[in-house]
Amino acid sequence: MADTSVPLAMRQPVSLRLASNVFLLFWLLLAAFPLVWVLAMSFKSPVDAFSSSAWAVLSGPRTLADGNGLSIVDIVLGIAVAWGAIRAATRWLMPMAAGEGLAQKAFSWIVVSLGFALLFILGFFVALPWVATPIEGLLGPLGQPILGLTTQHYQSVWVENAFYENFRNSMIVTFGVVTVSLTVGTLAGYGLARSGSTLAFWILIIALVFRALPHSVLVAGYLPVFINSAEILRPFLGENAPTLYGQPLAVIAVLVSINQPFTIWMLRSFFQNIPHELDESARVDGCTHFQAFRWVIMPVMWPGIITTGLFSFLLAYNDFLVTSLLLDASNQTMVPAIAGYFNRETTTTDQVEAIAAAVSITAPLFLLVMIFQRQIVSGLTAGAVKG
Amino acid sequence: MKFKTFAMFVGPSVVLMLLFIAFPLVTVLINSFQVTNPVFITQEVETCTPGFVTQTCTTEVKTIPVLDEDGDVVRVTQWVGFSSYANVLGGERFSRAIADLDLGQLANIDFWKALRFTLTFTLVTLPFVLVLGLSIALVVNNASKSIKGPVIFVSLLPFIITPVIGALSIRWLFYGDGIVTVWLEALFDTNLSVAANGWAVEFLMMFYRVWHVAPFAFVILYAGLQTVNRDTLESAMIDGASRWERLRFVIIPHLMPLIVFITLIHLMDAYRAFEEVIGFSSESHRITLQYLTYDYLQPDDAGNRQISSASASAMLTMIGVVILLAAPLRRTWRDQRGA
């Protein structure tokens, strides 16, 4: 802080700066500790994970004794791979995601990130052991395992307990919610931003009231209708009338609607920041409202869309209440599925598996913040400044 | 913009909101006055067992559900007026508790228990969220530029994480022989059992909520700090205002609209707290209003859901939202009108 841009009178005494930095450090510890600790637990055998000694949780003596350990060679190689991966992510992926691109760019970004995740998993779990084993043999004492670490809980969660099915369901619901809610919300947000009518004003106010509704109130309304929907819809649809309960499509529709109030408020404030003159000049040139929207607004609206999409993603991905009540066990998403693990509480192994599942759910969110930090921050503040 | 064009732009969104938000509200309102039950009939059934000389016959009165020709249970829907509400509010027990002026008895009824906790939870966490958020914002604003990015990254994690999992990650630190509990036990030389103590669980739930929402307050207030007028600050300093006075009389008034915004969002979100109950498995100690409705909606052992009670408790929860938000909503209404 000793830079010369700060006026002399604005500089702070050392004690204040020290206190300020200590507090910052305290907050960072508070924010990160639970997550880091859970991450450490997920890689240990149950005895270590629930050990009362912090050092045992970190170093994992029992895990090591069971024959699951990492040597110095493994650790060095692992750090190298992880570092390379982070570098690759910041070098290639971040500029791509940050670029104000088009839909194609978003699509190519998804492909790239999926490919990256695949390469990372292959590199870490297949290539790394394959390279490390011969080197360890050569190095002798350096090749001896020193740190207990096991991925067996992840294996039992993902392979034996078929967590990938929950993952797939989560992806279906999340993808559906994000695309539908952005399509519907963009149109509405644009309409609301460009219309000063009383009707638009009332729609916004009512949407704000809807935003405050507890989701359980709405689910209480859906459940009886969804369960009996085959009977209710039979007069209209005949014998093919579906039972909406347990249908991912129904859940997508529900989550999109619940999310609409937030989406239209947010997108409206983004569209208000795009100058009126832009689409008005297009209209003077003979475009209809839709043409102006398609050819003038759409190319410049992507930052707002990405930000709103992120928040729709979070809502759908993090939801527990709606998905757990409206989907049955056969197509459960990840977050409600985890409740099954820690409610069993039969053995500590179940507990550690729940922890591994929790870390698996968190990992994509972690990547999301890493890549989209700027958009998330801008989205949070855009709502505050305008709303 | 012509009305027709406007309708085409806004139409899909409005239809979705009508279909999936307004319509369910009407259903809930109607359902809260109705009870759907299977129809039972009482029948005299004579069962005879072969005995010596004569048969021994017993006649029993049995209640059996009526089946239709497909073999399904016949259900009938009855208009019950406010009886579901009375049921949720505690009925007899409620009037007795009121007559005795016994708050403890009142707090044993699920609805009042949930209301008590939800309100305490909402109001107690609010000041902590604001103060912690503002402190982090001030401190980060004070930190050197190079570390701001990573600091914001780490700070966003508690906010972005799935609420159930955030609650779980704190639960695992405390429940049973969680590491923090072990440290606390060593520090105070006692034996702690966090999961069995209602107040400890309540404290943890509040702690989780503050941990989860403070980053949100921080990001918004930090953005607000960037727009504080430097000249005003400097003239305040020339007038001899101390650091604290500058914060109190220049910075906080500047941030006031944002603080109001955070308060509004926090009231909305904390009032519908739900994930805490799942994450901390606190249903035997502390429940929230939203969990109460969720609990009624869960099928019981026989597979029946108490739709009517759920609807009644949902309506009561809604009334709470309306009361809570009346003042801030009127403000927004006036602001938007004026704009």
Image (spheres, grey):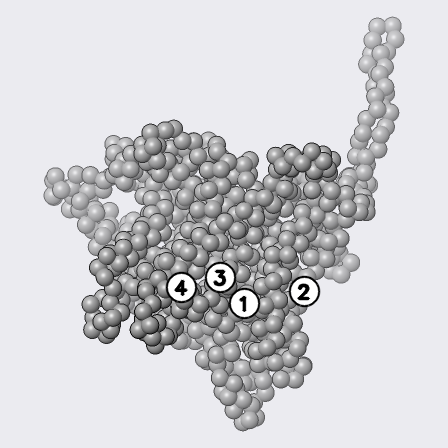
Where disc 3 sits, the SS reads: helix
| Residue to which mark 3 is pinned | B262
| Residue to which mark 4 is pinned | B248
- Amino acid identity at mark 1: Thr
Both labels 1 and 3 in a single chain: no
Q: Position of residue A264 (x, y in %)?
A: 56, 70
What residue sits 62% from the left and 67% below the top? B330
Q: Which of marks 4 and 3 is in front?
A: 4
Q: Position of residue A281 (x, y in %)?
A: 52, 91
Among numbered discs 3 and 2, the one appearing first in the sequence: 2
- Is residue A209 among the parts visible in the rendering? yes
- Is residue A167 among the parts visible in the rendering? no
Distance of label 1 from label 3 (alpha carbons): 18 Å
Position of the C terminus of chain B by quadrant: bottom right
Position of the N terminus of chain B by quadrant: bottom right
> Which chain does the numbered disc 4 sit on?
B
Q: Where is residue A90 in the image (x, y as percent from the top left)?
A: 29, 65
The disc at residue A263 is 1
> Which chain does the numbered disc 2 sit on?
B
- Amino acid identity at mark 2: Leu
Where disc 1 sits, the SS reads: helix
Q: How crowded is mark 3: few (under 14 residues within 10 Å), some or many (20 or more)?
A: many
Q: Nearer the viewer, residue A70 or B277?
A: B277
| Residue to which mark 2 is pinned | B18
